[in-house]
Image (tube, rainbow, N blue to C red):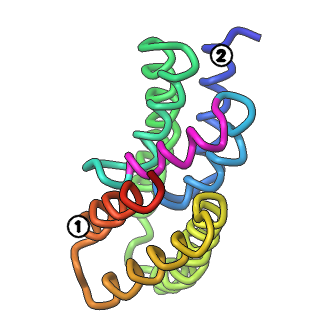
Amino acid sequence: MNIYLELFLTFIKVNLLSTSGPASVGLIYTETVGKFISEAQYVQAVGFSSVLPGSDALQLAMYIGYNTAGIPGGLVALVASILPPTLIILGVVSVLHRVRRETWVASFVEGLTPAISMVILFSAWKIFDKGAEGWQGWVIGAVSLVALLLQVNARIVIIAAAMIGVLLFS
């Protein structure tokens, strides 16, 4: 199969089956590692996409597309990532505009919140489990968790963890 078509179909699938940028990170892992990139490349890409501003899922898609087929591959993966949510949102907005005063809409959104939180937590665990090497990874993870609980800016935590990782793992 043509590599561009394969990238397009993979990222269409990811974005049709996932609910948000961070939640799709686990699905992107399942669909791309071993097929387009290695596990080590994926862990590095997740780290970089977490530090950079913008959507993690879009940055991962562009990286995987670029890594697989250069600039055209990155653009194909980006378009495939943007297209489904855009079309779905346009459809949902037109429906919600008509039913926005219904009580079931608020209940529906309230029911989604815990499920999405668990999807994000599960994805984070899978990434941590693959990227944490020995006790140093657990220490960096624990310190990062404490910092986030103390409401330190997430980008500062990620940059500090990356610098500590360079010192510990070099």
Q: Is residue 127 one of those drawn in magenta? A: no
Instruction: Tell me if 99 is positioned left or right of 26 in this view.
Output: left
Choose top left, top right, bottom left or bottom right for residue 93: bottom left
Image location of residue 120, percent across then percent down? 55, 69
Q: Which residue is mark 1?
A: 156
Looking at the image, residue 125 lies above or below residue 13: below
C-alpha distance separating marks 2 and 1 = 38 Å
Image depth: mark 2 or mark 1 in front:
1
Residue at 71 percent of width and 41 percent of height = 31
Task: Describe the element under mark 1 as helix, strand or loop.
Answer: helix
Q: Amino acid at mark 2?
A: Leu
What's drawn in magenta, residue-wise? 37-49
Q: Nearer the viewer, residue 63 or 90?
A: 63
Q: Main secondary structure of the magenta part?
A: helix
Image location of residue 80, percent across then percent down? 52, 29
Q: Amino acid at mark 1?
A: Ile
Q: Earlier in the sequence, mark 2 or mark 1?
A: 2
Q: Which residue is mark 2?
A: 5
Q: Nearer the viewer, residue 51 or 132?
A: 132
Task: Describe the element under mark 2 as helix, strand or loop.
Answer: helix
Choose top left, top right, bottom left or bottom right for residue 118: bottom right
Residue at 47 percent of width and 86 percent of height = 103
